[in-house]
Amino acid sequence: MVRKEVKTNAMRLLERLKIAYRQHEYECAEFKDGMQVADLLGLPRERVFKTLVTEGADRNHYVFVLPVAEELDMEKAAKSVGVKALAMLRITDLTRVTGYIRGGCTAVGMKKPLVTRISAKAQALPRIVVSGGRPGSQIELAPDDLLRASNAQYADITL
């Protein structure tokens, strides 16, 4: 029996924008962090990026995409979006804000456009891997294509 490919909002948006991507899938019965995902897929951790959603002191939401083995520098991140301070969004609010669930959140195809910054470290890589829009699915694409699809900017956002 041939398994039907399941398209996510992120994949549909990439296809609408005519952006080439490669899908990677893995078994996911429970939440896996980005480093576990990289290891499961046999990919170098520096090429696999996680998507973090924050809330600013101004009550707006901001998205940051960074290598899975690195930490978000809250001061640099806040400065990059022009707010005084940021706090991580509560997991219970993630679906309401983004339309995605934990382990499947990606900067592409969110419920509504949010200000997004991608780690400047992505610029040095020919391709990066980010969540495909659901747990168990990752998409590989050129960093500039992710930038375009998420209407993002590059910024120095890691510790």
Image (cartoon, rainbow, N blue to C red):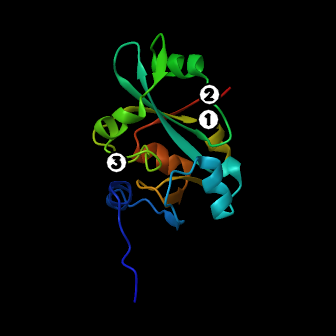
Asked whether residue 62 appears in the rendered view, the answer is yes
Q: Is residue 78 above or below residue 45?
A: above
Picture disc at residue 156: 2
User: Dot 1, crowdedness within 10 Å: few (<14), some or many (≥20)?
Assistant: some
Of the residues under marks 2 and 1, which one precedes in the sequence?
Answer: 1
Q: Quadrant of the C terminus?
A: top right
Q: CA distance from mark 2 to mark 1?
A: 5 Å
Which amino acid does the dot numbered 2 rest on? Asp
Picture disc at residue 109: 3
Q: CA distance from mark 3 to mark 2?
A: 23 Å
Could you say which is closer to the camera, residue 101 or residue 144? 101
Q: Position of residue 157 (x, y in %)?
A: 60, 27
User: Dot 3, crowdedness within 10 Å: few (<14), some or many (≥20)?
Assistant: many
User: In this figure, which residue is indicated by the disc labeled 1?
Assistant: 120
Instruction: Describe residue 64's horizontal placement relative to residue 37 as left or right.
Output: left
Instruction: Describe residue 154's horizontal placement relative to residue 59 as left or right.
Output: right
Q: CA distance from mark 1 to mark 3?
A: 21 Å
Judged from the image, the secondary structure of the residue bearing numbered disc 3 is loop
Of the residues under marks 3 and 2, which one precedes in the sequence?
Answer: 3
Of the residues under marks 1 and 3, which one precedes in the sequence?
Answer: 3
